[in-house]
Amino acid sequence: MSHLSMEALLALREPGVEPGDVAAREHMESCAACRGELERLHQRAARLRALPALRPSRDLWPAVRLRQRIESRRWQQRWTGVAGFLAAASVALALFWGDVARPEAADASAEIAAARERSQVLESALEEYNPELRVIDGRTARVSQALEDRIAELDQQLEAAQLRQVQRVEEEQQEARMLQLWRERVGLLNALVDVHVTRASNVGL
Amino acid sequence: MTLTRTLPMDPYLVANADAVLAGARQGDAAALEKLFRAFESPVYTLARRICRTAEDAEDVLQETFFEVCRSIGRYRGEGSLWGWVRSIAASKALMRLRRNRYRDTDELDDATAPSRREDTALRMDLEAALERLSETSRAVVWLHDVEGYTHEEIAAMMGRTVSFSKSQLARAHVRLRRWLGEEVDA
């Protein structure tokens, strides 16, 4: 008498009915050996499921965390590279705009006022974000430091231009110069906000 | 959100599942560690049963959780969290198995213990017998009989056919039966 193969016994454990299952079930009815074999198969699977859970011999979480941090830092560095490029592009654009778009005397004052206002908005955004209290990587720190240094230089130049304007020295030229400086300042502040605030929201800080 | 239908879970995690998951999605280290602690043992068990060495299993555990940390934002709560983590772990373990395929031959199994081949009286411990199976057979047995994957799912994960999965399972059970001394003379 031929008995059911292991494939046929295993097929009986699967849901649904495959071709050949009916004949196999009929055989089972009359064959105690195959019934016993199927029972042992069930028991073996149950014993496999009952094998004890295993644990690694050491704590691997620190290694996972470290790898995640390294990956995250790489990602930030890549992003900072892009941010640095964007910052440089913003400054270049501001300078270019300042060079090609010479202000008309009539609306120069209004434009300076608008640039001043825009500067204040950007400074408030930075103040709210408070970069001093944030942890940033080396490349972000270098980019923001360079932008802040340039803003400080611009502020000195703006102060000097304002003084000359008050003293009525080359009044019209000073106004044009101030507008150019304010535009550049807005460009630099935009870049600084990009570096800090946008970066922070991208990396979920 | 369902954490798991089968695993005993840390009561804190069960009670705070949504908060932990939300924290993990934000990259909160404490929340991610809670997930690691909850699933560390089941992931390692799965990996250790499939991989040949403890070192391979530890690597799979690390790779699995590195992937969990990176992709937790993509888990949308469809199906249990354990099901999602387990699919990552199974995939990583099978990837390692493929990488080590050169070692995975039945000939190697038999060559390492030639004297055992015809020893039908031998009673082996189930764990030892499982360990002695080829990596592919062991993976199919574990994924099918313990983790509950279907042959279709196993075939898809292994990049093989359903017939391959079925025949590997049958061959493995024939061997386990012999090694465990469960053969009955007809």
Image (spheres, helix red, strand yellow):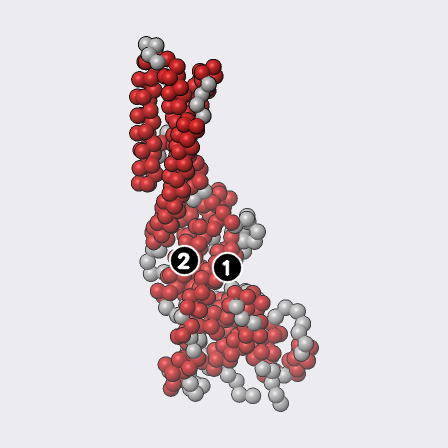
Quarter occupied by residue A41: bottom right
Determine whether A151 is above or below A109 in the image. below
Callout 2 crowding tier (Cα within 10 Å): few <14, some 14–19, many ≥20: some
User: Where residue B34 sits: x, y (%)?
Assistant: 42, 48
Residue B63: assigned label = 2
The foreground one among B170 and A185 is: A185
Badge 2 vs badge 1, beta-carbon distance below 8 Å:
no
User: Where residue A130 sits: x, y (%)?
Assistant: 37, 29
Query: Cα distance, mark 2 to mark 1?
Result: 13 Å
Residue displayed at 38% across by 85% down: B114
Question: In the orientation shown, which residue stands out farthest toward the top?
Answer: A167
Residue displayed at 41% across by 61% down: B60
In the rendered image, is residue A18 in sight? yes
User: Split into 4 quadrants, where in the image is the C terminus of chain A?
Assistant: top left
Secondary-structure class at tag 1:
helix
Secondary-structure class at tag 2:
helix
Residue A31 placement, left or right of A89:
right
User: Which chain hosts label 2?
Assistant: B
Labels 2 and 1 within one chain: yes
User: Split into 4 quadrants, where in the image is the N terminus of chain A?
Assistant: bottom right
User: Where residue B75 sits: x, y (%)?
Assistant: 52, 50
